Image (cartoon, helix red, strand yellow):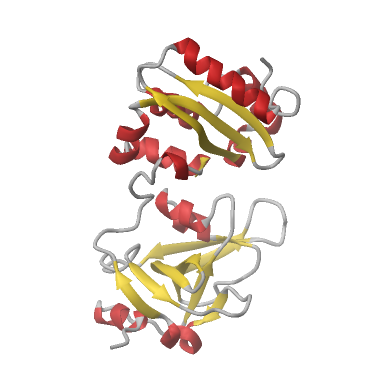
Amino acid sequence: MEIKLIDLIQLAGVTLDDFKIHCATGANPTPLEAFFDGKFQQWQEPQNQKNFECRHILSLIHLGGTRWLFAGVYEVLGVAPGKWKPTNCYMYSTREILGLDHLTGRALIEFDKVFRASYLRGKRYADQLRVVSIREQRMTIGDFPGFNSIILSHRMLQTLVRELNPSWRSALSNVSGVYLITDTLTGKHYVGSAYGGEGIWQRWTAYATTGHGGNKELRELLEVGGPDHVHFFQYTLLEVCDINSSNDQIIARETHWKIVLRSREFGLNSN
């Protein structure tokens, strides 16, 4: 039997009449990153045009293909000119509608949006939002995917560290190794290593906290580019080593990767 999202919302006692469907996409941060960080509402409120001239917003976050995550219903309280450039921007004030926790971040939606528009008239498209499944728990960054599958934005790293995600912490605190930080704005690489203590987890916690982790080169980059430049950083692992490996062994592997990636000549390593 086909289940429509709008029907489940109405069963929860929420009546939608004058509403828009926001099909949220974008980058730096992505709406999903903002959702994981508990800041989706703040991510959604600034707009380049008056996109929310309605009473309510039904928010969906793109997961890929025809799949979307239901991110809540928000009441529009007002709008004011934005205080940032470009000047033709607007800051909306919204309030999340309560009583939908059993769906927000849990309901996975099938919606074949074959057009570019992202702000849709609700009455026209609501019947096309079909519920595929409802997760037992609210979607989060999730369990550790394996050492060969790590690609983290800075915001995702901050979320993992702030929440002390148990599966990630357990995995990363029990290995040493060599990691790669990529400045996605310039494509330049920084190769670093972690050994002793809580291994990779301890080292990456420093990056999540300070942005530069005490590295001279990254500190200088953030001084020039500003503190927000850290959100262009992407983290991954190049090589995983036993936590009991000697410091010299790890440093030798770090040197190897610096040579392979030419990160001294063309990247962010100075030694």
**Camera sees residue 243:** yes
Q: How many marks?
A: 0
Taking the image as shown, residue 137 lies to the left or right of residue 194, namely left
Residue 12, relative to residue 78: is it above or below?
below
Q: Where is residue 90 in the image (x, y as percent from the top left)?
A: 62, 62
Task: Give residue 4's quadrant in the image.
Answer: bottom left
What is the quadrant of the N terminus in the image? bottom left
Give the camera-side residue of 53 and 256: 256
Residue 101, relative to residue 155: is it above or below?
below
Give the camera-side residue of 195 and 223: 195
Farthest residue, direction right: 265
What is the quadrant of the C terminus in the image? top right
Residue 243, relative to residue 3: is it above or below?
above
Q: Which residue is drawn at 34% across and 27% down?
A: 173
Q: Which residue is drawn at 54% across and 72% down?
A: 52
Taking the image as shown, residue 210 lies to the left or right of residue 74, namely right
Q: Where is residue 21 in the image (x, y as percent from the top left)?
A: 49, 76
**Camera sees residue 218:** no
Q: Where is residue 262 in the image (x, y as percent from the top left)?
A: 71, 27
Q: Position of residue 263 (x, y in %)?
A: 68, 27
Residue 109, relative to residue 105: is it above or below?
below
Q: Which residue is drawn at 38% across and 23% down?
A: 242
Task: Give residue 199's quadrant in the image.
Answer: top left
Q: Residue at x 48, y 54 (%)?
A: 42
